[in-house]
Image: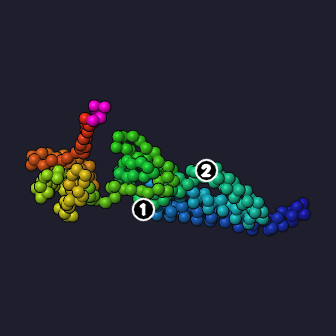
Amino acid sequence: MSDLVDQLAILAMTYGAKILSALIIFLLGKWLARKLSQLLQGAMEKRDLDPALRHFSSSLVYYGLLVLVVISALGQLGIQTTSLAAVIAAAGLAIGLAMQGSLSNFAAGFLLLVFRPFRIGDYVELAGTAGTVEKILIFTTELTSLDNKKVIVPNSAVTAGTIVNYSANPTRRLDLVIGISYDDDIDRARDAIRAVLDADDRVLADPAPFVAVSALGDSSVNFVVRPWAKSADYWALYCALTENIKKRFDAEGITIPYPQRDVHLRQAGAAGSAA
């Protein structure tokens, strides 16, 4: 009996310290992993990042650190963790290769949510399509096109191409090309265009509108008309100015020409017909 007690005492002395150390490492590491996860989530909340991204990133950090803590605790007990780490690394590599496309979309979504090249409600052009941004998700970005179609774009395709954000700046410039006949008076046409611009309150005074002759075309003298407006007024003003300039030209007797082609017919000579 005394021998059994002695053996238990020796085992307790030998492994008790290791078990206690492993337990301390596990508890302390778990607490530290949770703290770091909470700090990351708080930092992302301050930047007003997407809630799904905050939850996913904080959970990823927590469980990743927890795996390292468990491996460290097992190593403290004398368990060989080299093979265990190798298995985990191999499994991670296999999962990464199998989910390569999804991971690239996730990484791209993370960058979009961090750097914010566009926001919800912006009108953008990306990955060969255009529309209003409805959702920025972890793997995809959802747009609504002008004809009310739902367009889902993978985030990797968004970051791989050019992003045009039409709503990023508060003002935009309209570019119109208006042609008049060569027989019309240029100064009179310019005054008519400026009168239409001055009559619309949506046209900004600063920067001042630019109106000038840009080209002498095949059948018309072309004006470039470049007023500035608020981004929200762009399309409504574009259509209104186009219509109102046409009406003003009609009232002033100024002609907007259209392409014409003259066809000359030659009659066969008398000698040919006689033969």
Q: Is residue 158 above or below residue 26?
A: above
Location of residue 146 with respect to 1 vertically, above or below: above
The question of residue 273 being in magenta is answered with: yes
Q: Is residue 200 visible?
A: no
Q: Which residue is depicted at the point 70% across and 62% down? A: 71
**Which sits in the foreground, 46 or 235?**
235
Q: In the rendered view, would you say 242 is above or below 20?
A: above
Say which quadrant the N terminus sits in.
Answer: bottom right
Query: Residue reaching furthest left?
Result: 252
Amino acid type, callout 1: Arg
Q: Position of residue 180 (x, y in %)?
A: 18, 51
Q: Which residues are magenta?
A: 271-275
Between 94 and 56, which is closer to the camera in this rendering?
Answer: 94
Residue 30 figure quarter: bottom right
- Label 2's element? loop
Q: Is residue 35 magenta?
A: no
**Earlier sequence position, callout 2 versus callout 1:** 1
Question: Could one spot residue 257 in this view of the protein?
Answer: yes
Question: Which residue is disc 2 drawn over?
Answer: 99
Magenta stretch, overall SS: helix
Which residue shows up at 38% across the image and 56% down it? 164
Q: Which mark is residue 140?
A: none
- At a point 9% along the width and 49% down the height, the residue shown is 252
